[in-house]
């Protein structure tokens, strides 16, 4: 399954491969990638994992489209399962 994450251009860490470092950098710099997803993605427990991921993809694309400072990037990775 292809998964996507929102990150910032200045974050040198991979959300998928270096998640602890990525999150520490986000917290240290005050970046707000995860909060932006929370504001724009309409996810739900009643949706499947695939449907929620499609909604997250849509939200990431919208955030990037309207990012006036060109700060955000979309990171994608093919994963075997949701918990990998």
Image (tube, grey):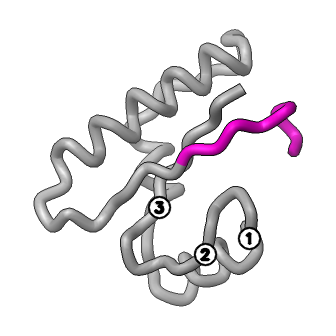
For marks 1 and 2, give the CA distance.
Answer: 6 Å
> Left or right of 83: which side holds 40?
left
- N-term-proximal mark, 2 vs 3: 3
Going by the picture, which residue comes out furthest to the front? 78
Up-down relation of residue 66 to residue 51 (above or below): below
Q: Earlier in the sequence, mark 1 or mark 3?
A: 3
Graded by Cα atoms within 10 Å as few (under 14), some (14 to 19) or many (20 or more), the crowding at tag 1 reads: few
Magenta highlight on residue 82: yes
Q: Position of residue 1 (x, y in %)?
A: 72, 26
Q: Which residue is mark 3?
A: 7
Q: Secondary structure at mark 2?
A: loop
Question: 74 left or right of 70?
Answer: right
Helix, strand or loop status at disc 3: strand
Image point 46% across, 31% down: which residue?
Answer: 57
Looking at the image, which residue is at 19% across and 54% down? 67
Q: Report the disc number at residue 13.
A: 2
Give the magenta part as a residue range: 76-84
């Amino acid at each position: 399954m292809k998964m996507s994450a929102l990150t910032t251009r200045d974050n040198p860490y991979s959300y998928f491969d270096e998640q602890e470092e990525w999150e520490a950098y986000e917290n240290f710099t005050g970046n707000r990638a995860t909060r932006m997803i929370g504001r724009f993605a309409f996810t739900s427990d009643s949706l499947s994992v695939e449907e929620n991921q499609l909604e997250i993809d849509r939200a990431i694309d919208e955030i990037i489209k309207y990012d006036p400072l060109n700060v955000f990037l979309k990171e994608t990775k093919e994963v075997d399962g949701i918990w990998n």
